[in-house]
């Protein structure tokens, strides 16, 4: 950064020491450069003047030119109001201030022409403009086209730094910019993509001539921000590949061949075969594998993970599978034991509830190499868990594990084991590129043969009896049913009451001995919860009434109906995850979304999306559009990106373009030694030095 841009903010005209302290605390603005990157969130058109007569037809803000003809103060209730009658050649309107009368009143000079800007609101039978912007017309220095609007805070506003005040100091800075902003992108990219210069982009984003120029500035600045983010990701990946060697698995091995030829439960889909080829290729490079495997619930990720681990075992290594909860770890363990029951392989389960005696036995089996596959929870991360020769680690639902936790699995061998990260939460392409840009991504995008897509429908509370009738007809066919209620921390008591009311209504409508109902919720003891779950798993109960605790980790192929109560209170990805609990058997499955009559626009879109499609990736894209990346990826992870202007939920095309350009440059010149790339190299070096070095961590 040049000397001018690194100037402390207090040295800018109109700021000074007191305002500087506020800007630092309230907005994180310390230097001229920080202020330049404090971008407006919208613009208002100040090029046009309207008349008082036009105001009733306008929706939004308007700008007027005229005179103040009368000023008065009125006490309405306990509140004092300042009212000025404003007039132009077409009529008059009242300007109203509820606060600040003392310092506004002296400004309201008669027979002086004013520029007024504000939003006309209907009050009783007439319009007025509350708290307008007011400037003597001869003091309007220049007619602005678009005026930038900035985020402010109460404290900033009280010290003259409302949006208008921030605009004033930014304009003072922009007027000094000529020749001060160095170009950071190579000329080839600027010309190829028809981008405006960096200097012009900063001028036009804050003081645009018109909407077209503001748009060009946004595109240039968004591209640059995303380009350096993608360049950083790809560079970290290159460094990781160069620094970290990986075990070479030259053979597919006997365990893999034996299982594939004799015990595979069903033919692999083309998507599963494609992913296995990608993994096999990684194993032959001599570099460490770091791969993210995405696939919907039921797409066959576990089978791909097992075949991956069998390749490791066939090359003389051990494998580990880590899951975020005991229920999920136990389910994986049972699945693997069942799939490998006819093979001479040893599998163990290690969780927090495993006793000392069994722990000791497992630790010995790991160290002497007897155990081929260890399945477990965070317990696998403990230092006491030592392998003889760990070659493959599979991490399920990786977003539940922190970066540092995953790194500890690396240290279980001299050469780090290959890592396969699985997630059943489909991640939109732009987010996968951005948050997992340093990983290779594989996608299983088709369901195994015989799987039928789940029929989803939306029903209002008034259809309750019809829904009960449908449940009875499914139970008569020997099927089982989930009824899920929301559990949201802020309204836990209300949720609990709704759950219990629902349980009682179902118990009345589905009487014993013909129907049996299980109930599971967060206030139950773990042992009671497990007992109720098991009754349902064994088919002893036909209906499971539960909160979202069943979202992960219950596999009941006979359950064919998922009823989601108050479904408008769930996020899209959660609805999709819950729906994935059914449809695990060969029978047709159903998901019924129950809602109240009043639905917000977003709720309607969520429900309509669920009814329309079973495609998790399409659902994830809509979810991104509705919620933004912070909610989907977790605000902490989202905050790590520190994006100032780009929006991952809206700028997908720019993300892809930035990724392609960053990849082109690094393929041509991996060390950025070309003189044209020296500015990029310098900026990238500063970015990477300013962050913790996660490049050696999956």
Image (cartoon, rainbow, N blue to C red):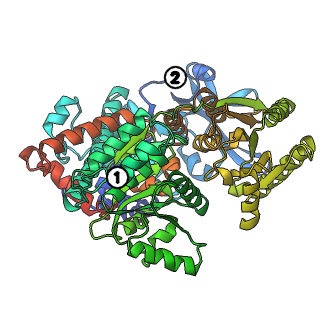
Relative vertical location of residue 189 with respect to residue 692 in this rendering, above or below: above
Q: Is residue 38 visible?
A: no
Front label number (2 vs 1) = 1
The residue at the point 66 percent across, 35 percent down is 603
The residue at the point 75 percent across, 36 percent down is 594
Q: Is residue 277 left or right of residue 511?
A: left
The residue at the point 87 percent across, 44 percent down is 515
Between the C-alphas of marks 2 and 1, the distance is 82 Å
Quadrant location of the C terminus in the rendered image:
bottom left
Q: Is residue 568 visible?
A: yes
How many marks can you see? 2
Q: Is residue 278 left or right of residue 505?
A: left
The residue that label 1 is drawn on is 254
Classify 10 Å Cα crowding around label 2: few (below 14), some (14-19), many (20 and above).
Answer: few
- Local SS, label 1: helix
The residue that label 2 is drawn on is 50
Provide residue 430's location: percent of width, then percent of height: 39, 40
Provide residue 171's location: percent of width, then percent of height: 33, 44
Q: Are marks 2 and 1 in contact (CB under 8 Å)?
A: no
């Amino acid at each position: 950064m040049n000397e001018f841009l690194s100037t402390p903010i207090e040295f800018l005209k109109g700021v000074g020491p007191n305002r500087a302290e506020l800007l630092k605390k309230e907005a994180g603005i310390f230097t001229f450069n920080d202020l330049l990157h404090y971008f407006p969130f919208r613009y208002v058109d100040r090029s046009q003047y309207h008349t008082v007569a036009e105001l009733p037809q306008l929706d939004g803000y308007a700008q007027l030119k005229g005179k103040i003809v009368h000023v008065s103060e009125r006490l309405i209730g306990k509140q004092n109001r300042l009212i000025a009658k404003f007039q132009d050649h077409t009529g008059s309107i009242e300007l109203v201030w509820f606060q600040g009368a003392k310092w506004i009143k002296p400004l309201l000079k008669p027979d002086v022409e004013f520029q007024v800007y504000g939003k006309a609101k209907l009050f009783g039978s007439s319009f007025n403009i509350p708290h307008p912007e007011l400037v003597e017309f001869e003091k309007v220095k220049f007619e602005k086209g678009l005026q930038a609007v900035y985020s402010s805070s109460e404290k900033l506003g009280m010290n003259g730094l409302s949006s208008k005040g921030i605009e004033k100091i930014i304009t003072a800075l922009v007027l000094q910019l000529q020749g001060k902003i160095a170009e950071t992108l190579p000329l080839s990219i600027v010309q190829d993509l028809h981008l405006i210069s960096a200097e012009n982009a900063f001028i036009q984003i804050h003081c645009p001539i018109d909407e077209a120029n503001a748009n060009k500035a946004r595109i240039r600045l968004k591209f640059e921000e995303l380009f350096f983010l993608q360049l950083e990701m790809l560079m970290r990946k290159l460094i990781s590949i160069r620094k970290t060697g990986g075990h070479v698995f030259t053979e597919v091995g006997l365990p893999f061949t034996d299982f594939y030829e004799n015990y595979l439960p069903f033919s692999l889909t083309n998507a599963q075969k494609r992913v296995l080829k990608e993994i096999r290729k990684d194993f032959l490079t001599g570099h460490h594998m770091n791969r993210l495997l995405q696939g919907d619930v039921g797409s066959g990720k576990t089978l791909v993970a097992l075949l991956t681990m069998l390749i490791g075992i066939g090359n003389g290594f051990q494998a580990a599978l880590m899951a975020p909860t005991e229920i999920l770890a136990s389910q994986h363990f049972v699945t693997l034991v069942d799939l490998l029951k006819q093979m001479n392989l040893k599998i163990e389960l290690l969780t927090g509830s495993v006793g000392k005696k069994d722990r000791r036995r497992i630790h010995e089996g790991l160290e002497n190499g007897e155990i081929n596959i260890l399945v477990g929870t965070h317990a696998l991360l403990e230092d006491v868990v030592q392998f003889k020769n760990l070659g493959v680690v599979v991490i399920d639902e990786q977003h539940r594990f922190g970066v540092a936790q995953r790194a500890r699995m690396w240290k279980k061998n001299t050469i780090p084991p290959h890592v396969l990260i699985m997630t059943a939460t489909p991640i939109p392409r732009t987010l996968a590129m951005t948050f997992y840009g340093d990983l290779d991504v594989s996608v299983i995008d088709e369901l195994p043969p015989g799987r039928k897509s789940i029929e989803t429908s939306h029903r209002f509370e008034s259809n309750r009896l019809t829904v009960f009738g449908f449940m009875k007809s499914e139970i008569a066919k020997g099927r089982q049913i989930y009824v899920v209620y929301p559990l949201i921390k802020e309204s836990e008591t209300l949720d609990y009451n709704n759950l219990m009311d629902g349980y009682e209504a179902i118990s009345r409508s589905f009487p014993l001995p013909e129907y049996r109902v299980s109930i599971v919720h967060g206030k139950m003891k773990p042992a009671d919860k497990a007992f109720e779950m098991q009754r349902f798993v064994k088919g002893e109960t036909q209906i499971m009434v539960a909160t979202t605790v069943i979202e992960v980790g219950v596999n009941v192929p006979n359950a064919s109906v998922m009823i989601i109560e108050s479904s408008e209170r769930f996020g899209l990805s959660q609805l999709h995850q819950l729906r994935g609990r059914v449809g695990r058997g060969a029978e047709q499955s159903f998901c019924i979304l129950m809602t109240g009559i009043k639905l917000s626009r977003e709720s309607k879109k969520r429900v309509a999306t669920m009814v329309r499609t079973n495609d998790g990736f399409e659902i994830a894209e809509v979810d991104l559009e509705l919620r933004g990346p912070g909610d989907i990826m977790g605000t902490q992870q989202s905050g790590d990106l520190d994006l100032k202007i780009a929006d991952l939920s809206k700028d997908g095309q720019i993300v892809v373009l930035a990724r392609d350009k960053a990849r082109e440059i690094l393929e041509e010149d991996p060390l950025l030694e070309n003189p044209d790339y020296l500015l990029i190299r310098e900026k990238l070096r500063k970015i990477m030095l300013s962050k913790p070095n996660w490049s050696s961590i999956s």
